[in-house]
Amino acid sequence: MPMIIACWNSERHEPQAWQWQELKRRLLEANPNVICCPECWLDYFDSSWHPIFSEHLSGQRNSQNERKIGLWSRNPWTNVDTVGSSEIPPGRFVRGTTEVEGTEIEVIGLCIPYAMSNVRVGRGGRTKWEEHRLYLQSLGELIRPSLSRPTIVLGDFNQRIPRTKWGAKQMAAMLEAALAEYRVWTEALLPGLEEPVVCHIAGSSHFALERSWGETREHLGKPLSDHDGVFAEIGIKP
C-alpha cells in the first residue's frame, strides 16, 4: 500500500497561531504517514502522533519547546539519533526507524543552515555559506550507510534542486554528492507551485515514486510560512 510523506517548514509559528493551524489542516488533509516540520514546536500534533526531535539549539533566541527539526509518525520510533555527528552544526539532525504500512523504514530529518546562518545574527562570527558547507561536508558520511535499507531523507535543505541562479555552484555540487544514490522526489517545479522549493523529500532505491506535489504557502492573500509544503506518495518496490 502506498505511503504519503509530508514536509513543511512552519517558520517557527507557535502551535496556537492561525498560520500553524492552517498549515496543520493542510498537512493532515493529505493523510500522511510521516510528517517532517523544520522550525517546529514540540506540541504541534496531538498524542495520536509519535514525535522525535533534534536537540535543542542552545544560545539561540528561541523557546525550550522549539526545535530546528521534528518528525512525526503514526507508529513509535526506535533507533533514535538526535545528534548525527559532532562535525555538523548542532541541533539540526534527527533520525529514527518507524513502521509504515507494514514496512520498517528509516527516516532522517535535516535542517541544513541557510547561507547567512550565524553571520550577522545568532552567535555571529561566521562567513556566508560557512555553516551550510560544514553541514554538507559530513552529511554524505551520515546518510550513505542507510542506503542498504528503506530510508527517507527530508527536511529543509536550503537549496533548490537543481540549482538556480540564486544558488552557489559549490554548495549545489556538495549537496548532490551527499545525496548520491538517493532520489530527490521534489526536484524542479512541483505541481501546485509557481517556483522550485528548498524543502525536499528524497529516498533510497527501495521506493518507487507514485506522485509528488506542492502546497502553496499563500492563504487568503497572506503567507502561512516562508516555505511551501512538499508531499510525496511512494511505495515499496516488489
Image (tube, rainbow, N blue to C red):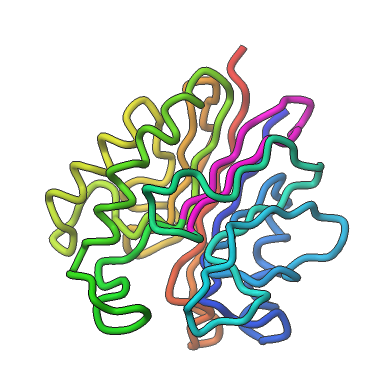
Foreground pick, 6 / 57: 57
- Tell me the magenta residue range: 92-110
Residue 22 locus on image (x, y percent): 66, 76
Q: Is residue 197 visible?
A: no
Q: Residue furthest top?
A: 238
| Dominant secondary structure (helix, strand or loop) of the stretch shown in magenta | strand
Is residue 119 shown above or below 67? below
Who is closer to the viewer here, 97 or 197? 97
At a point 75% along the width and 41% down the height, the residue shown is 77
Residue 209 x/y as whole percent: 51, 31
Magenta run includes residue 225: no
Residue at the image position 64 percent from the left and 57 percent from the top: 53
- Residue 70 % position (x, y): 62, 58
Q: Position of residue 98 (x, y in %)?
A: 72, 36
Q: Is residue 135 left or right of residue 108?
A: left
Q: Is residue 14 above or below residue 201?
A: below
Q: Is residue 100 magenta?
A: yes
Figure check: 195 above or below 50: below
Outermost residue, right side: 47
Where 204 falls versus 168 (above or below)? Answer: above
Residue found at x 26% / y 34%: 177
Where's the N terminus, which quadrant?
A: top right
Q: Is residue 60 left or right of residue 125?
A: right
In this rendered view, identify the residue nearer to me: 158 or 92.
92
Count of numbered tags: 0
Q: Residue at x 17, y 64 (%)?
A: 166
Q: Locate residue 178: give its quadrant.
A: top left
